[in-house]
Image: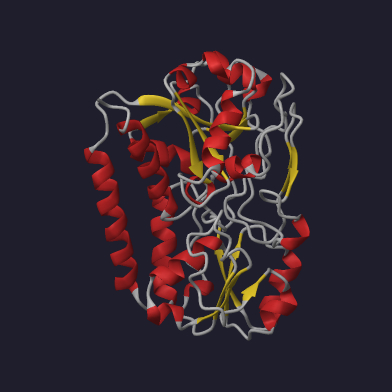
């Protein structure tokens, strides 16, 4: 969740021309991957499910964005069977899992050392805490979603005296920061006001997997003047990925991350999660890129061996996760897929599946543990 992920990945759509049903064509999507300056709202095309807010939270209670902006592709919507309503929050959790990004930004003024930092992305909330006490001492405020266990890996961790702030100029300026960590789609007005008051901006713009996470960790470690702490975090990540690699099956199963008529294809954080878990991304195999509409009928026709979806929970043993799996299994035609027949509809907590940080490794571990548990 992870961060909510947080920062805003602008998804560059370079979908190859192909003969694909309209339901599988890339569209302009707000793939909440890193933004924390606008409340998530969406309408599922072809579905009875319309959601506003996260798992029942009211939009006005949330920052203006949980994570990031989505792909700049064609604006076609998924077409097909009207889907039964799924539990509230699953749609946004799925969207969070499809993080993609624009080209990596060059080093900028925001990367210089800072003493009073306001974090406005879940990713930076998580990384600044993980960097240790010296980094934490420089933080004067974290994002409004820092304590939401559905999306944040540091829920309840930052001390109560550390202010939680939505991305409003007045609230941020009151903290007297010298650096604000923002997302790509922070409004121009907020940017201008912060800059005009001497607040430097460090902007996250890309969230396509582990490589981007490494870059983010190193930027933040430089800002708090502790590069060795950043390298220690990455060494831990490398150790976890090595353990996952050692357990990968010789013949990976194909998996689709699907929910509410959308799938995560090539160039998304799920693509890296699937590879780390020892799975092959089915939507990528079909030649798709980014976070794309895939109608229920089309997904069923692909007969996926594994279906991955999100659940609004902190851990996979939460009842919300089996409920999410049952909701997918109950959709028309899904029961006939290889995934349903083999018990491989797997719900992963949103803060892992939607993460743009360390949670990606956790999502891969959850998937791999579940699949390995099937073996005799």
Vertical arrangement, residue 309 with respect to residue 225, above or below: above
Image position, residue 125 (x, y; %): 51, 67
Residue 215 coordinates in the image, percent (x, y): 41, 59
Q: Does residue 114 lie above or below 231 as drawn?
A: below
Q: Tell me which residue sits at (50%, 16%) in the image.
A: 337
Q: How many marks?
A: 0
User: Between 147 and 284, which is closer to the camera in this rendering?
Assistant: 147
On the image, the x and y values in percent for residue 118 come to 57, 76
Judge from the rendering whether residue 49 lies leftward or rightward of residue 176; answer left or right. right
In what quadrant of the picture does the C terminus appear? top left
Q: Residue at x 32, y 28 (%)?
A: 374
Looking at the rendering, which quadrant does residue 358 occupy?
Answer: bottom left
Q: Position of residue 70 (x, y in %)?
A: 63, 44
> Residue at image x 40%, y 68%?
130
Q: How is the image coloured?
A: secondary structure
> Residue at the spot x=74%, y=29% of the render?
47
Quarter of the image holding residue 20?
A: top right
The outermost residue toward the front is 319
Residue 267 can be seen in this image: no
Instruction: Determine if residue 50 is in view.
Output: yes
Q: Is residue 24 above or below residue 3?
A: above
For residue 296, which quarter of the picture? top right
Residue 286 is left or right of residue 196, and the answer is left
């Amino acid at each position: 969740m992870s961060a909510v992920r947080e920062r805003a990945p602008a998804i560059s759509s370079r979908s190859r021309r192909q003969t694909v049903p309209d339901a599988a064509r890339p569209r302009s999507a707000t793939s909440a991957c890193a933004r924390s300056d606008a409340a998530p709202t969406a309408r599922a095309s072809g579905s009875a499910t319309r959601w506003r807010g996260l798992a029942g939270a009211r939009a006005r209670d949330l920052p203006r964005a949980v994570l990031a902006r989505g792909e700049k592709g064609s604006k076609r919507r998924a077409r097909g069977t009207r889907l039964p309503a799924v539990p509230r929050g699953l749609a946004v959790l799925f969207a969070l899992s499809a993080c993609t990004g624009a080209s990596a930004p060059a080093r900028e003024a925001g990367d210089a050392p800072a003493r009073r930092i306001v974090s406005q992305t879940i990713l930076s909330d998580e990384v600044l805490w993980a960097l240790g006490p010296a980094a934490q001492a420089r933080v004067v405020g974290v994002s409004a979603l820092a304590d939401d266990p559905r999306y944040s890996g540091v829920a309840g961790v930052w001390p109560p005296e550390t202010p939680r702030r939505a991305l409003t100029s007045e609230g941020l300026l009151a903290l007297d920061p010298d650096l604000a960590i923002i997302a790509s789609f922070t409004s121009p007005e907020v940017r201008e006001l912060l800059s005009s008051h001497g607040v430097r901006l460090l902007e996250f713009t890309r969230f396509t997997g582990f490589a981007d996470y490494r870059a983010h960790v190193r930027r933040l470690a430089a800002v708090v003047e502790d590069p060795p702490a950043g390298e220690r975090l990455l060494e831990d990540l490398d150790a976890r990925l090595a353990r996952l690699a050692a357990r990968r099956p010789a013949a990976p199963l194909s998996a689709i991350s699907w929910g509410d008529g959308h799938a995560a294809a090539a160039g998304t954080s799920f693509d890296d999660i699937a590879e780390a878990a020892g799975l092959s991304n089915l939507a990528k195999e079909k030649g798709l890129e980014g976070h794309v509409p895939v109608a229920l009928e089309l997904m069923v026709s692909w007969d996926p061996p594994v279906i991955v979806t999100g659940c609004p929970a902190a851990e996979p043993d939460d009842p919300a996760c089996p409920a999410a799996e049952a909701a997918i299994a109950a959709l028309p035609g899904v029961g006939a897929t290889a995934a349903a027949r083999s018990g491989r509809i797997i719900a992963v907590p949103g803060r892992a599946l939607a993460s743009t940080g360390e949670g990606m490794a956790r999502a891969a571990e959850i998937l791999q543990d579940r699949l390995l548990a099937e073996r005799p």
